[in-house]
Image (cartoon, rainbow, N blue to C red):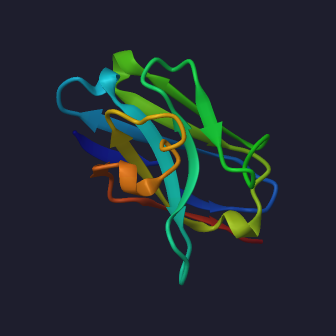
Amino acid sequence: VQLVESGGGLVQPGGSLRLSCAASGRAYSNYNMGWFRQAPGKEREFVAAIRWTGGTTYYADSVKGRFTISRDNAKNSVYLQMNSLKPEDTAIYYCAATGYAPLGTITNKDRYPYWGQGTQVTVSS
């Protein structure tokens, strides 16, 4: 699976952005998808994930209620709608894919073998 993110940029605090991740390769619809982010000097952290069925989503506490993950298997794409952005959301955002992800592991970056190149999100006035 190859992943390409887009949609990052510079936005003011309180603003919104929508990230997209386009996947290529077979059987995309069978993969669980996640978004992670990495700020300078920090480890890569979990942001959100969605099961391959699209029926179950997971969020980090820091983004719950502000970010929404969704997927369109017909378009081989996953999205991250980010609202009420804060300066602390500034990071490189990565899309990732994984097959089997037992309960409790889908938030673990080490579970994901496929990664995109990342897209920069900067929240600043």
In the rendered image, residue 11, in percent from the top left (x then y), is placed at 68, 60
Q: Is 14 above or below relative to 64?
A: below
Q: Is 45 above or below relative to 68?
A: below
User: Which residue shows up at 40% across the image and 59% down it?
Assistant: 118
Q: Is 19 above or below relative to 54?
A: below
User: Which residue shows up at 42% across the image and 24% down it?
Assistant: 52
- Residue lying furthest left: 26
- Residue lying furthest bottom: 41
Q: Is 81 above or below relative to 124?
A: above
Q: Pick the quarter of the image with the C terminus.
A: bottom right
- On the image, which quarter does residue 75 sit in? top left
- On the image, which quarter does residue 2 sit in? top left
Q: Depth check: give the residue in front, 68 or 34.
A: 34
Q: Pick the quarter of the image with the N terminus.
A: top left
User: Which residue shows up at 79% across the image and 62% down it?
Assistant: 13
User: Which residue shows up at 45% across the image and 59% down it?
Assistant: 119
Q: In this view, does 42 lie to the left or right of 67?
A: left
In the rendered image, residue 78, in percent from the top left (x then y), is placed at 45, 33
Evaluate whether residue 7 shows in this view: no
In the rendered image, residue 82, in percent from the top left (x then y), is placed at 67, 45
Evaluate whether residue 57 shows in this view: yes
The number of discs equals: 0
Q: Depth check: give the residue in front, 83 or 104.
A: 104
